[in-house]
Image (cartoon, rainbow, N blue to C red):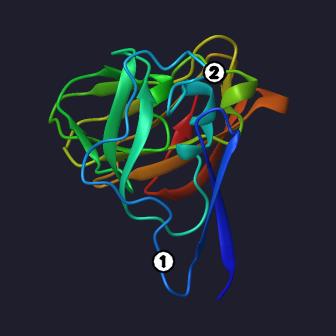
Amino acid sequence: MARRYITIGSLGSIHGYDDVDYDKAIVTEGPISSGAPVDDSDVLRKEDMGSLVGIEGTVTGDIIRWNELTDEWEVVHFPFDPVIHTDSHVLLVSELNISHRMNSAADKIFTLPSVGASEDGSKVTLMKIGSGKLTVQAVDTDFISDSSATGTIYSTTALASITLEYVHAITTWVVQSPAGIWTTT
């Protein structure tokens, strides 16, 4: 095929491999990690890893990403496994680009995270697998489709799902791929 190149760490070391003879960029029997990913000599630094969450194309397997809550690296399966919730939940920025399912007979709310320019293009899929009403709440002055500022969108339809994509230029969560009836307020 072709000669491929990867960079490691401070982006100063370039390593090459031929993807005909060897189709893996990096293989290790142990984890690639760093105790404090802030130094230029670290193998992996937080600022070098930002593109992992927004991977384009078909990617499967385990990836390394920075967990904002725990302030450390974590290995997660990609594509991400859906998260099942049984109570109202405030989504974090680190929980974007993941599918969330609400399984409750009572009315529940997913509250979207506070987002900005760095989250432009981020998506979240929300599904109602219980019988209760599912409401999605915007924060700050964000809109959900044609809702009011800090508005909502809700569904009482069985097995309703919706994918929202954040568009920073208009501070709006744009509705994509809705299933069921969704109403904005």
- Quadrant in which residue 122 is drawn: top right
First in sequence: mark 2 or mark 1? 1
Q: Is residue 44 above or below residue 59?
A: above
Q: Secondary structure at mark 2?
A: loop
In the rendered image, residue 181, in percent from the top left (x then y), is placed at 47, 52
Q: Is residue 20 above or below residue 157?
A: below
In the rendered image, residue 183, in percent from the top left (x then y), is placed at 53, 39
Going 58% across and 35% down the picture, which residue do you hit? 9
Task: Give the side of residue 44 with respect to residue 142, left or right.
Answer: left
Going 52% across and 49% down the picture, which residue do you hit? 163
Residue holding disc 2? 115
Which image quarter holds the C terminus? top right
Q: Secondary structure at mark 1?
A: loop
Task: Give the side of residue 172 with respect to residue 179, left or right.
Answer: right
Most foreground residue, 17 or 47: 17
Residue furthest to the right in view is 169
Going 23% across and 36% down the picture, which residue do you hit? 132
Q: Amino acid at mark 1?
A: Asp
In the rendered image, residue 149, in percent from the top left (x then y), is placed at 69, 17
Q: Amino acid at mark 2?
A: Val
Q: Is residue 14 above or below residue 183?
A: below
Going 39% across and 57% down the picture, which residue do you hit? 79
Which image quarter holds the N terminus? bottom right
Most foreground residue, 160 or 167: 167
Q: Is residue 43 above or below residue 156?
A: above
Residue furthest to the top in view is 140
Residue holding disc 1? 23
In the rendered image, residue 177, in percent from the top left (x then y), is placed at 55, 59
| Badge nearest the viewer, 2 or 1 | 1
Work out how far the residue at label 2 is from the one at label 1, CA to CA, in angstroms.
37 Å
Mark 1 neighbour class, 10 Å CA radius: few under 14, some 14 to 19, many 20 or more: few
